Amino acid sequence: MTSAASPAADDSRFGRDRKVSLMGPLPLDCGAELSPVELAYESYGTLNADASNAVLVCHALTGDQYVASEHPVTGKPGWWARLVGPGKPVDTDHFCVICVNVIGSCMGSSGPATINPATDAPWGMDFPVITIADMVRAQALLLDHLGIEKLAAVVGGSMGGMQALSWPVLFPDRVQASLVIASAARHSAQNIAFHEVGRQAIMADPRWRGGAYYADGDAPASGLAVARMAAHITYLSEAGLTEKFGRRLQDRDAKSFGFDADFQVESYLRHQGISFVDRFDANSYLYITRAMDYFDLADQGDGSLAQALGRAKARFCLISFDTDWLYPTAESRRIVHALNAAGAEASFVELSSPFGHDAFLLENPEMDRVVSGFLGNGGEV
Amino acid sequence: MTSAASPAADDSRFGRDRKVSLMGPLPLDCGAELSPVELAYESYGTLNADASNAVLVCHALTGDQYVASEHPVTGKPGWWARLVGPGKPVDTDHFCVICVNVIGSCMGSSGPATINPATDAPWGMDFPVITIADMVRAQALLLDHLGIEKLAAVVGGSMGGMQALSWPVLFPDRVQASLVIASAARHSAQNIAFHEVGRQAIMADPRWRGGAYYADGDAPASGLAVARMAAHITYLSEAGLTEKFGRRLQDRDAKSFGFDADFQVESYLRHQGISFVDRFDANSYLYITRAMDYFDLADQGDGSLAQALGRAKARFCLISFDTDWLYPTAESRRIVHALNAAGAEASFVELSSPFGHDAFLLENPEMDRVVSGFLGNGGEV
């Protein structure tokens, strides 16, 4: 770890569209080592003199480092621009916020689409299978590079929450506060089952070709779109779908008696599938879903979640949503019980929302209050 | 309708592996007419002299007429052999039980794989899009052929329940009792969404070829397997999956750090997908899911479910399962409220089971008692 040093205002390590190639090597849970470790990231706000105001935001399965910046492919605002920025709940006037593309992903960090130094060609399925802990260790490498010894906080929703939860367990002395939103300490059988459907859909696409589709760019878009459609259903609640679409027909007065998208919900899902393939790599989808399925934080404590969490020295805050059936409140409560058993400082709130798992990405003033309340005391600024 | 006549014991219209081609024509909801109407069916027990002891059992999406007979492809016992037979809750010592393969399906009744008389080739996607009501009207044609004017009861689970619910609305004078298990009066947005994922998975398989795969028999097995996997998750409860599989690994002491089926639940799902394609036609899957998505019984009552059900003269019994999230108890309750509003005789019971929607196919002594209690008074034998 490099020692913390006050970065100059023009420090090229900070800012938008940053990318660094670190030699590591990064030892992975599978036994392999990754070197170099390419890391693409964004930072917002200014690191203070003693580098004590850094907040790491961790992204979800199909998220990226553009937490509060326009997405370079879709042109859409950052996925948490509502939450991260000047005067916002994660206040970049006070914090230096960093968001790193996870390894295994496809927005610039090492993953199946990046170059395998051994072959000078894209890794494809030769990329090592990675875990949530590997993603976290790669982020720690980046913090070393940035001169950040200790995080004021780590924040994440969904898979980002798995990283936020893992950080204080893997690096007890490097995190002061962990904010875990709509997440889980392990993947359930049903979670794994949905991911497996998505993987099989991708692998069933003849254009997948064992992952070796980068040379001609003819990617398994159909399989990836189906995977995204299946996953998308799990992000929404039954009640939310009913409220949003019900049985309403799409641009038609009556049923077509055909196989076009008659219902609005069909049209919506098809759009979700088709637009996803423009911005995401199918192999990355395989690798990241695998990492999530492998995730069981109790593995860090000889099978005991409380023992794993007992290593942490951070304060914790957990938020769940009442209609989230992907990572339901019961799972957050299980984590809180383990934190209590471990003697950790933990607060927990279940928020009400009709939007299911997706609620963590949507406008929710109550969530904003909880986030700013929790971080407000933890920034040491 | 032909008049009821006592069938001789050797009446070839009754028995196993029956098939008939009726000229109809059968007017369909889409506006087309089907002629001939091929119907494959099984019967169990003996029709009495006044043909008053007939019970029609309606099968689910991927079910078939082999309700209490060995399946000709898989060699497995009938899907409701537990419930239908001599001395069983649907007692073939008392009732003449008939089960017909629905039109649109692939076990002998008219569907995309049967011959289009206009071309002398398989229909493929030229087969007209059918509805649950069309399936019911085709069954009524068969009853005419069998000399059965009135059913002692119609019984069905899941999609079979949709038919059982529709029968007394479409043919008020032909049904005395309707038993609807684990079913719904309409498909919700979430139900439609899951089906749409399955259809997109099939259509994304290049071997689907617009449904014209019968000539070389190279069917879209990969797409159909993915569709089945996605659907299968909805048949099981989260708790049931956790109990059955949890995060247990498959034939391994540790994670493989690869993409084989590491977890038992992955292996199970893959098996469900692969074994399904041996017995089911992908185009039939498209047509039947479409029929289910189109189903909203309120359409028969100008948008009012109570008005639709008001036409019925039958007694009703509804059974739901507490862990069924595909067709949850709330939906059965909604039907019962509409039946009450319509002044119909209706009983309702929610049974407890850890097995989700699949519970209706599994051993459940309480369900047996409800079924035999309800039918015991309705057989007029």
Image: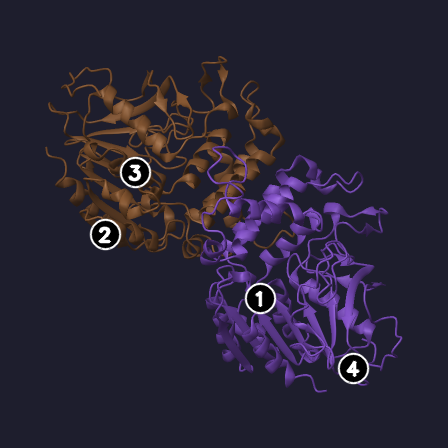
Chain colours: A purple, B brown
Q: Chain of mark 3?
A: B
Q: Are marks 3 and 2 on the same chain?
A: yes
Give the residue number, with chain letter if any, for mark 4. Answer: A51
Which amino acid, by three-letter code, is at mark 3? Ser
Question: Where residue A373 appears, x then y in whole percent?
Answer: 60, 82
Give the residue number, with chain letter if any, for mark 3. Answer: B166
Camera-near label (4 vs 3) is 3
Camera-near label (3 vs 2) is 2
Write the residue at 47% across / 14% down.
B118
Q: How far, Cα to Cα, is label 4 from label 1?
A: 28 Å
Q: Are marks 4 and 3 on the same chain?
A: no
Label 4: element kind: loop
Q: Are marks 4 and 2 on the same chain?
A: no
Q: Is residue B344 above or below residue A340?
A: above
Category of crowding for the residue at label 4, using alpha-carbon neighbours closer than 10 angstroms: few (below 14), some (14–19), many (at least 20): many
Q: Is residue A326 above or below residue A254?
A: below
Camera-near label (1 vs 2) is 2
Sequence-wise, the earlier of marks 4 and 1 is 4
Label 3: element kind: helix
Position of the N terminus of chain A by quadrant: bottom right
Question: Where residue A131 appears, x then y in whole percent?
Answer: 66, 59
Q: Are marks 1 and 2 on the same chain?
A: no
Category of crowding for the residue at label 1, using alpha-carbon neighbours closer than 10 angstroms: few (below 14), some (14–19), many (at least 20): many
Camera-near label (1 vs 3) is 3
Sequence-wise, the earlier of marks 3 and 2 is 3
Q: How far, Cα to Cα, is label 3 from label 2?
A: 17 Å
Q: Is residue B209 toward the left or the right of residue B172 in the image?
A: right
Q: Is residue B70 toward the left or the right of residue A254 in the image?
A: left
Q: Nearer the viewer, residue A77 or A208?
A: A77
Give the residue number, with chain letter if any, for mark 1. Answer: A360
Write the residue at 61% across / 49% down.
A272
Give the residue number, with chain letter if any, for mark 2. Answer: B341
